[in-house]
Amino acid sequence: MATTTPNYGWPVPTSADYVAQGAVAIEALGDAIDATVFGLPSGALALVKTQVIGTAVSSVNVTSAFSATYDNYKIVISGGVASGSIAFGLKLGSTATGYYSGAAYAQYAGGGLGWRNSNNATSWAFISSATASIIPFNCEVMNPFLAKSTVINFMYIDAATNGDGGHGSGFLNNTTSYTDFTLTPASGTWTGGTIYVYGYQK
């Protein structure tokens, strides 16, 4: 009986094997392939949590979002309607201090450039859209479960013809381990839409 090369060394039959030996080798090969393929990652991103936003809610707490399984995550909101302010905050656990961030943006019309910053705030603040019919959000969160400073990277989106767009980043000034986060509109409520949490495969 031979083995495959150069990677896994799976057992395979050869032309010199008896029928019984070949059958044993094929069975062992199938078991080896099954065990190896089961352990392989299916892609760079793995869906960790899906949470549907309720009706007229003033905040959304997403539990069991972070764990030791992944170090880095992506949070995406798809759909939904905002009744009031286009701004909202992202808070980890119950921590309400030490959030720092900055974003550079360009106006869609007029070519104006600018920046926004947040210094030792109660949450990371975002402006998602000037159009109440959508709540766009795309943010990467690094190290939330680890005993390190949590770092974020996000898109700044203002979905209006006279709005602006850009990118920003920030960090939380502590080394606390978190498993959940909360999204809170600055005013008004959210209805509908889905929050997706993905983990980056190690």
Image (cartoon, helix red, strand yellow):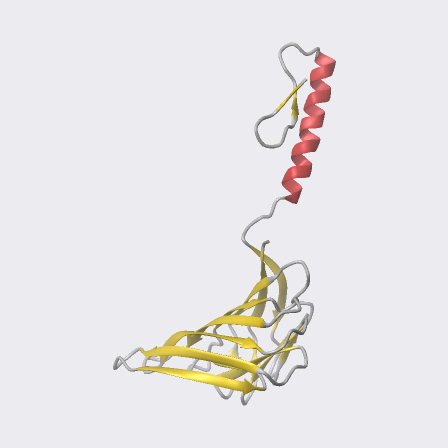
Horizontal arrangement in the rendering, residue 86 relative to residue 177 (left or right): left
Residue 91, image x, y percentages: 60, 79
- Residue extending furthest toward the left: 110
Query: Is residue 128 at all visible to an observer of this figure?
Result: no
Residue 200, image x, y percentages: 57, 58
Q: Residue 56 is drawn in which quadrant?
A: bottom right
Front residue of this view, candidates 10 and 19: 10
Residue at (62% x, 32% y) in the render? 8
Residue at (27% x, 80% y) in the render? 109
Residue 178, image x, y percentages: 67, 72
* The N terminus - image quarter: top right
Residue at (35% x, 79% y) in the render? 164
Residue at (51% x, 76% y) in the render? 170
Front residue of this view, candidates 193 and 27: 27
Residue 141, image x, y percentages: 56, 68
Front residue of this view, candidates 71 and 137: 71
Q: Residue 19 is drawn in which quadrant?
A: top right
Q: Residue 198 is drawn in which quadrant?
A: bottom right
